[in-house]
Every structure is written in structure tokens, then in C-alpha cells.
Image (cartoon, rainbow, N blue to C red):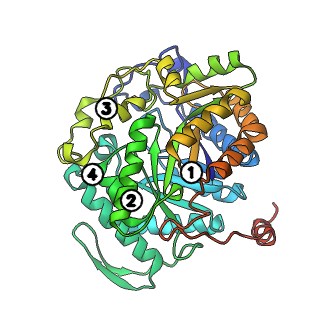
């Protein structure tokens, strides 16, 4: 199993009201950046990088970064910059980008070069995820919503070719045209880094991922819609002539571990506090209906019937916002407690969904640096080793153990090879 760590890196500002019992209601794309404090922003970027370094020390396989734009709930407006830093200052953990928003890139060749450099500096630790983005990103970057899906697929095809095939070559597509494609930087991994697709329950995205034989990562959705979505992936794979398994599936959800049950309860309630994150249920009034209905961005035929239920778990569109904290505890979309009580709950989720990759979403909302570090320490000491044993018992291999296209085991690196890679970073 592949075990990763994630946080949205929220912009936490108590003086601006981004740190209260319910957070300051902020409708998407309506808050002026006049309130932005650069000194606070500098502190927070360094805080979140420090937490990622500690997560690697505690034994996480992957450090997940994501990207959103023009919003205080996620500071990852230039995720590839953060990934570049982590490529140099970490040693073992995969750098998982979930992901670059392909439709807003007018020059995907630039993305080819950026990601290849990250893969080289990290010596082959990049996992490159793509996303289509939300209405927020389309508006913030003036990207035409009706062509979102077309641009996504064409950019993906172009990037894979530029990574995999020697240049120079021409590219004459509908949305991208190049006379000369010959990037003088190629990925460390051959033919290219693993590509993953995160999402909620988009029928188009799920089926496309299965057709491409790449992992699909469900993002903080309720368990029953998640299981139905995973089944659609498996059914599509069967139609494509191969058998998918846990290695093709991943799940991100909110997990916090603490020293006592009382402290765990107090801290986990901060998930629904702080910056008004539309993906953290409990923050009311954040979703801008205009952004959910951009012409051409989505349609009823493109989503599963269960999408309303699934996105409600994330506090997004499709249902009643502000789901009570208690409801999320009840349905396992938030898990909290001491290691003793958290581990059985994680096992329940793994048994029900059977993903080969999991990401624990922690240190978010109004959680402090100390809150995040306590949880990371306890995860490293007790939770991660237990989850690895559970995964072995349930036979849940990740995509670095079993090939997602063939289902065959992937040869693992020897300790000697790993030591050589680590030594290549040198000492300052």
C-alpha cells in the first residue's frame, strides 16, 4: 500500500476572521486580496513545508500537493514551485501532484519542462496528477469552460508524447499548435512519471482513467458513492480487456490522531473552522452557484447519479452545505482519536473500499502547527506501521507494487540502489 499525507495549506489569519468557530463566510472569488498579509503568507508557506519534511521523517510514502487559485482556502496557487522545493529538500517520499489543471495551460510544453525538472531533481520521485479544475479556475485564468474536457485530453496526449518520444516533432491539434517540440529536459523516470487522476464521481473522468489504465483517486467522498465509483472503474477496465485492482484506486479522507480522545475531538473540530474551505463540510455560504453552472464545464450525463451525495461530503455543490461534524464522524469522512481507536476505523474504510493508495488529510482548517506535528508523530510511531500490516492482510497493493496496466508485480529497488540515490543529493 502507498500511504500519503495531504493538507490544503489554508491561509490562516485570526485577525481577518479566518480562524473562528465557523470561519468567515467567503463566497468563492469574492474576497479581495487587499487583506493578504505577505509576512503571514511567508510564515505559512514555510510552516507547511516543514510539516511535509516531518511527514517524510515519520514514514509517509508520498507528500501530496494540490492547486487552487484566487482563494484563501488553499495557498497552492503555484504548486509546482512547492514541488520543486520538496524535490531538493526531501530524500525518499514521492512528490504527488494532484494536480496540475491542464485546461488552464495555454502552453503545456512549459509544463512538460517544469515537471521533468522536478522529476530529475528528486531523482525519480514525481507522481504527476492531472485535474480538469473547477469553475473557480476557469474564471480565474480566463479558460473557456466549454472546451475544458477537450483541452484536458489534448494536453495530456501532448505531454505524454513530449516526455516519451524523441524530438523534434510538430504538433497540430485543435487547441495547441507547435512547430518545434524538442524539450531539452526529459524525465528521470522512463518512459515518464506515473500519471494519476483525482476527482469526485465524474463519469467521464472515471471512465477515461480506466481506459488510460491510470489510477483514480477519490477525494474525501462518502464511502458508498466512492465504492460505486470504484466499481465503474473496474467495469470499464473489464470492457477494455484488463482486470483492475487496488493498484488502480486511491482514497483521500480526513484523519487526525492525537494523544487523548479529548484532545483528538477538540482538534478534529477545527477541520470545519478557519478559512472557509468549500471542500470542508461545515463552512456555510462559500460556494458560488455561478461557478457551478458554467456553460459546458459539466452536464448531467457526465456525472454519476450519486455525485450529489459524494460532493456533499466535501461541502461542495450537490447538496446541503454545512454537514454537521457529528455526521462526518458517523460516516467515516472524518476519523479522529488516539492510535488505538483510529486504527480499527481505518481498517473499516480499507475493507469497504479496497484502495491501494490512501492519503490522510490532516493539519487543515484552523489546526495549528503543533496540532499537525502531534498527529504526524503518532501516525509515524503507531498508525502507519499498523496500516501497512492491514494492507498486507487485505492484499491491497499500490501502483508502485503492481503495474496498473498489466496487473503484474513491479520489481522493487534494492536497499543498495536506494542508498545510492539518497547519496546523490550530497551535503550542504
Q: State the separation of the CA atoms marked 2 and 4.
A: 23 Å
Q: What element does badge 3 sit on?
A: loop
How far apart, in angstroms, are the residues tagged by discs 2 and 3? 23 Å
- Please state which of residues 190 and 200 is positioned toward the viewer in this rendering: 200
Secondary structure under the numbered disc 2 in the rendered image? helix
Q: Secondary structure at mark 4?
A: loop
Q: Nearer the viewer, residue 89 or 303?
A: 303
Q: Quadrant of the C terminus?
A: bottom right
Q: Which residue is mark 3?
A: 317
Q: Which residue is mark 4?
A: 143
Q: Which mark is residue 209?
A: 2
Q: Is residue 206 above or below residue 190?
A: above
Q: Position of residue 154 (x, y in %)?
A: 30, 66
Mark 3 or mark 1, earlier in chain: 3
The image quarter containing residue 176 is bottom left
Mark found first going from the N terminus, 2 or 3: 2
Identify the residue at image location x=23%, y=33%: 290
Question: Where does residue 199 sit, x and y in percent of width and height?
Answer: 40, 47
The reply to whether residue 21 is visible in this rendering is yes
Q: Nearer the viewer, mark 3 or mark 4?
A: 3
Q: Residue furthest left?
A: 295
Nearer to me, 39 or 30: 30
Q: Which residue is mark 1?
A: 357
Q: For label 1, count other residues whose C-alpha is less than 10 Å away and answer few (under 14), some (14-19) or many (20+).
A: many
Amino acid at each position: 500500500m502507498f500511504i500519503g499525507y495531504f493538507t490544503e495549506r489554508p491561509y490562516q489569519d485570526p485577525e481577518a476572521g479566518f480562524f473562528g468557530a465557523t470561519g468567515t463566510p467567503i463566497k468563492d472569488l469574492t474576497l479581495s486580496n487587499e487583506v493578504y498579509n505577505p509576512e503571514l503568507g511567508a510564515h505559512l508557506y514555510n510552516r507547511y513545508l516543514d510539516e511535509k519534511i516531518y511527514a517524510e521523517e515519520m514514514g509517509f510514502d508520498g507528500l501530496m500537493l494540490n492547486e487552487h487559485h484566487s482563494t484563501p482556502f488553499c495557498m497552492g496557487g503555484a504548486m509546482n514551485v512547492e514541488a520543486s522545493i520538496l524535490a531538493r529538500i526531501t530524500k525518499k517520499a514521492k512528490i504527488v501532484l494532484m494536480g496540475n489543471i491542464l485546461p488552464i495551460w495555454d502552453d503545456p510544453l512549459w509544463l512538460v519542462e517544469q515537471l521533468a525538472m522536478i522529476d530529475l531533481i528528486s531523482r525519480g520521485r514525481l507522481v504527476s496528477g492531472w485535474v480538469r479544475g473547477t469553475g473557480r479556475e476557469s474564471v480565474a485564468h480566463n479558460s473557456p469552460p466549454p472546451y475544458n474536457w477537450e483541452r484536458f485530453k489534448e494536453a495530456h496526449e501532448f505531454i505524454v508524447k513530449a516526455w516519451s518520444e524523441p524530438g523534434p516533432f510538430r504538433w497540430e491539434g485543435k487547441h495547441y499548435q507547435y512547430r518545434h517540440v524538442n524539450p531539452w529536459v526529459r524525465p528521470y523516470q522512463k518512459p515518464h512519471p506515473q500519471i494519476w487522476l483525482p476527482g469526485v464521481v465524474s463519469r467521464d473522468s472515471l471512465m477515461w482513467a480506466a481506459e488510460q489504465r491510470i489510477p483514480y483517486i477519490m477525494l474525501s467522498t462518502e464511502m458508498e458513492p466512492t465504492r460505486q465509483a470504484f466499481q465503474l472503474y473496474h467495469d470499464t477496465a473489464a470492457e477494455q480487456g484488463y482486470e483492475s485492482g487496488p493498484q488502480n484506486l486511491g482514497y483521500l479522507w480526513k484523519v487526525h490522531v492525537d494523544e487523548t480522545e479529548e484532545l483528538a475531538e477538540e482538534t478534529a473540530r477545527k477541520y470545519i473552522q478557519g478559512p472557509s474551505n468549500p471542500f470542508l463540510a461545515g463552512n456555510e455560504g462559500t460556494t458560488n452557484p455561478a461557478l457551478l453552472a458554467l456553460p459546458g464545464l459539466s452536464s448531467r450525463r457526465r456525472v454519476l447519479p450519486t455525485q450529489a451525495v459524494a460532493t456533499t461530503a466535501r461541502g461542495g455543490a450537490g447538496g446541503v452545505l454545512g454537514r454537521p461534524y457529528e455526521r462526518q464522524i458517523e460516516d467515516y469522512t472524518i476519523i479522529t482519536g488516539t492510535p488505538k481507536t483510529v486504527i480499527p476505523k481505518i481498517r473499516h474504510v480499507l475493507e469497504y473500499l479496497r484502495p491501494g493508495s490512501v492519503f490522510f488529510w490532516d493539519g487543515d482548517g484552523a489546526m495549528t502547527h503543533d496540532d499537525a506535528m502531534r498527529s504526524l508523530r503518532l501516525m509515524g510511531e503507531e498508525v502507519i506501521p499498523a496500516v501497512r500490516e492491514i494492507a498486507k492482510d487485505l492484499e491491497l497493493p499500490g501502483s508502485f507494487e503492481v503495474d496498473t496496466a498489466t496487473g503484474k508485480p513491479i520489481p522493487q529497488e534494492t536497499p543498495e540502489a536506494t542508498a545510492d540515490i539518497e547519496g546523490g543529493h550530497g551535503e550542504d
